[in-house]
Every structure is written in structure tokens, then in C-alpha cells.
Image (cartoon, helix red, strand yellow):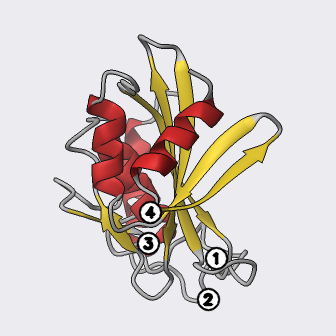
Amino acid sequence: MEPAEIASKIKELYPADVVDVRDFRGQCALVVKKDDILEILMRLHDDPEFNFDFLKDLCGVDYLSKRTPRFEVIYQLYSIQHKHMIRIAVQVPEKSPSLESCACIWNTANWHERECYDMYGIVFENHPDLRRVLMPEDWEGYPLRKDYPVEGPEEEWRGFKEVLQKHEEYKKYEWNR
């Protein structure tokens, strides 16, 4: 099934949730509201007609000052059986950047959602273990947001001195000295 055909069927099934269908360079994306995203993703996974059994990727996008709502979460879905794919873009408002976790559908979403949370501050409700994965737990801010300072925060991260002390302490174990 072609992505445009899949998008058309989803739009028929969820007319109140589909905001737009984008076609850019032959790639079709369905833009949807966040309210029923878990139901839509479950349908795309469970319905034998779609059978999207593989979540290829999940990432965030920040459209600061360019679009409202400010954020989108992008899901790249693929069906191994049917060999078709679709991109789902979910609108996430700046005021309450959260949406339902889909880790209950695809296990791999567990890691992708944690990364998206860590970099954009988008909270995935009912996630089994939502915490930072790339930045220290006590890091302030979300580095991939457009309003994050390019050269990093003004104040040095509190744990930096501790990391430097550990580095000095463990130098005695280096092999190439």
C-alpha cells in the first residue's frame, strides 16, 4: 500500500484527529493531534491491513517562532510483512509538552521516548522508565530546543568538578602512560 493511500484511510477513520497530510519529495506524513495518538498508533500496529510492526524512529522537532504548536513528535513506522511505511507527526504544545507513551506497542519506543524527553523535554505519559539517557540526571534544560544557548548554559554543570576529580583519580589505571 502506498503512503498516500494509508494516510487517506487513517484520515477517513479519524477525521477529527488528522490535521494535515504533507507530501514532501515523495514522502508522505500524516499530521495528527495528540489526544488520540495512542489509539491511532495501536490501530496502525494491530490492524492486519496496516500491520506496522516496526517503529523505525521516533524523534522531536522544535519549531520555535515558526509554527504553533511549537513541537512535533515524529514516528516512522514500517510494516515488515507489507513493506510499506508512513510518517506520523504529532503536534505537541509548548505549554504542556506531553503525550501518551507508545512503549506498550513497540518496545523500542522505550529508548526513543527517553531520548526525546532528554533532548526536548517532551514528557511521555505512562512511560515505564522516563529519565535522562544522554545528559546527567541533574542537568538543567533540554539541549536540542531552539532556545537552548548554543555555547551551553552560563553556569558550569554542578557535577563537572566531580567528573574532573574522578578523571584524576583514575589516571593511575591508564594503560598508555
Q: Which residue is mark 3?
A: 121
Residue 50: x and y in percent read 40, 26
Residue 125 sits in quarter? bottom left
Picture layout, residue 65 above or below residue 87: below
Q: Amino acid at mark 4?
A: Asp
The disc placed on residue 17 is: 4
Q: Image height check: is 157 above or below 30?
A: below
SS at circle 4: loop
Q: Residue at x 83, y 38 (%)?
A: 25
Q: Can you tell which mark lies on residue 18?
A: none
Q: Which residue lies most toward the right here?
A: 25
Q: CA distance from mark 2 to mark 4?
A: 41 Å
Q: Nearer the viewer, residue 50 or 70?
A: 50
The tag earlier along the polypeptide, 3 or 1, is 3
Which of label 3 and label 2 is nearer to you? Answer: 3
Q: Nearer the viewer, mark 4 or mark 1?
A: 4
Q: Is residue 79 above or below residue 55?
A: above
Q: Secondary structure at mark 1?
A: loop
Measuring 41% from the left and 74% from the top, which residue is drawn there? 139
Q: Disc 2 to disc 1, how far (Cα)?
A: 7 Å
How dense is the environment of label 1, judged by Cα within 10 Å: few (below 14), some, or many (20 and up)?
few
Instruction: Give the x, y percent position of residue 120.
Output: 50, 68
Query: What separation in Å lies between label 3 and label 1 (alpha carbons)?
Result: 16 Å
* Circles 2 and 4: CB atoms closer than 8 Å: no
Which label number is shown at residue 154? 2
Instruction: Give the alpha-carbon distance from disc 3 to disc 4, as whole Å.
Output: 24 Å
Q: Are marks 3 and 4 in contact (CB under 8 Å)?
A: no
Circle nearer the N terminus (3, 2) = 3
Alpha carbon distance from label 4 to label 1 = 38 Å
Label 1 sits on residue: 152
Residue at x 38% of width, y 65% of height = 136
